[in-house]
Image: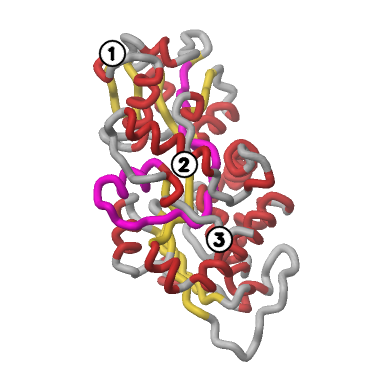
Amino acid sequence: MTNRRQLIQASAALAATAVTGFPAIVRGQARESLTIMTPFGFIPDFIELMNGVSGGHFAAQGLDAKLLGGQGTAQPIQQLITRQVDFIRASGIDVMRAIATTKVPLVSIATMYQGSTFHMISLKSKPIEKAEDLKGKTVGIVSVSGTTDVFLDLILAKAGLKKDDVKREVSGNSPGALQLIKQGRIDCFIASIQVVVALERMKEDVLAWSTDRYAPMPGQCYISTRQIVEARPDVLKRAMTAMRASVDEIMTQPLRPIFERAAKDFEIPGIRDVDALVAVEKVTADRLWLSEGRENLLRNVPKLWKSGVDALRTNNIGDPGEPETLYTNQFVS
């Protein structure tokens, strides 16, 4: 794999290959640098960021954008703290936990997923229809002490159950976890919406409900720091304008060409089954990007931040501070 797949620079040449036309890039002016990092490489879930580069949206805003693929949530946060990157994508709950633990002044400059990507999944023949049904059950989680583990704690608490009212098993984040239910090793599991869509496409008879039912909070956000917000407001404003254009293209144009174009620049897992990626992205946009209405696309919704902070405080998971200090909408039009 060439370095170009690891560190992509947006350029006017890439803008010319866009599926649809874009505003002309201002010529004769030096573009400003912008560095972004994902938490997990270039998985399909980050297509809006990859499209920002490959589709020329950052370049159209006069930005020389570099998109880096991280290895876990901790790495991008550390890179952000040391100002090696300008913003990252991370889950709202992970950001709030990081602030509560380290007191680093992280701030959400936009929310990509208004809803939670994580869902409780069970077989319809042995359904887990509500939190109260979890008592005495074995629940699959993605990882110990990870996001799904915390969400399970929040769900149990909302139903008046204790942590030890369930047994936990690591089941990963893949459709294969359903086999653990069929084998009787677990009763249900928490996994991402990508897994839900994959199981639906496989015609599996499953019941799935979002963790938002019991613990609503911002799903996936674009995170920066107060220092970067103060130092580079114009750059962040243009970056969010580019993200709006990228998201609009994804929602209004055929997705297959967008994925295929991005795959020329990034190593996207699962790209050989592009139809499956397209199916997942369509559901993601409908259920998560727009779950608070089109008028709130990319906006930080105050009630979700308040709900998230209240849940973490009530359950002694952490106190990230007052909700209104955790986000700004100054860069989202």
Task: Choose top left, top right, bottom left or bottom right for residue 314.
Answer: top left
Q: Residue at x 24, y 16 (%)?
A: 164
Q: Is residue 214 visible?
A: yes
Q: Which residues are magenta?
A: 93-122
- 326 sits left or right of 277 in the view: left
- Magenta run includes residue 124: no
Residue designated by label 1: 165
**Label located before the other in sequence (3 or 1):** 1
Task: Choose top left, top right, bottom left or bottom right for residue 187.
Answer: top left
Between marks 3 and 1 in the image, the one whose residue lies nearer the viewer: 3
Residue designated by label 3: 330
Q: Are marks 3 and 1 in contact (CB under 8 Å)?
A: no
> Which amino acid type is shown beneath numbered disc 1?
Asp
> Which amino acid type is shown beneath numbered disc 2?
Trp
- Magenta run includes residue 112: yes
Image position, residue 240 (x, y; %)? 57, 62
Q: Looking at the picture, does residue 198 appear above or below residue 254?
A: above
**Label located before the other in sequence (1 or 2):** 1
Q: Is residue 42 visible?
A: no
| Residue 305, numbered circle | 2
Label 2: few (<14), some (14–19) or many (≥20) C-alpha neighbours in 10 Å: many
> Which amino acid type is shown beneath numbered disc 3?
Gln
Label 3: few (<14), some (14–19) or many (≥20) C-alpha neighbours in 10 Å: few
- 99 sits left or right of 178 in the view: left
Q: Residue at x 34, y 69 (%)?
A: 83
Per the model, the C-alpha gap separating discs 2 and 3 is 16 Å
Image position, residue 268 (x, y; %)? 49, 54
Per the model, the C-alpha gap separating discs 3 and 1 is 44 Å
Describe the element under mark 1 as helix, strand or loop. helix
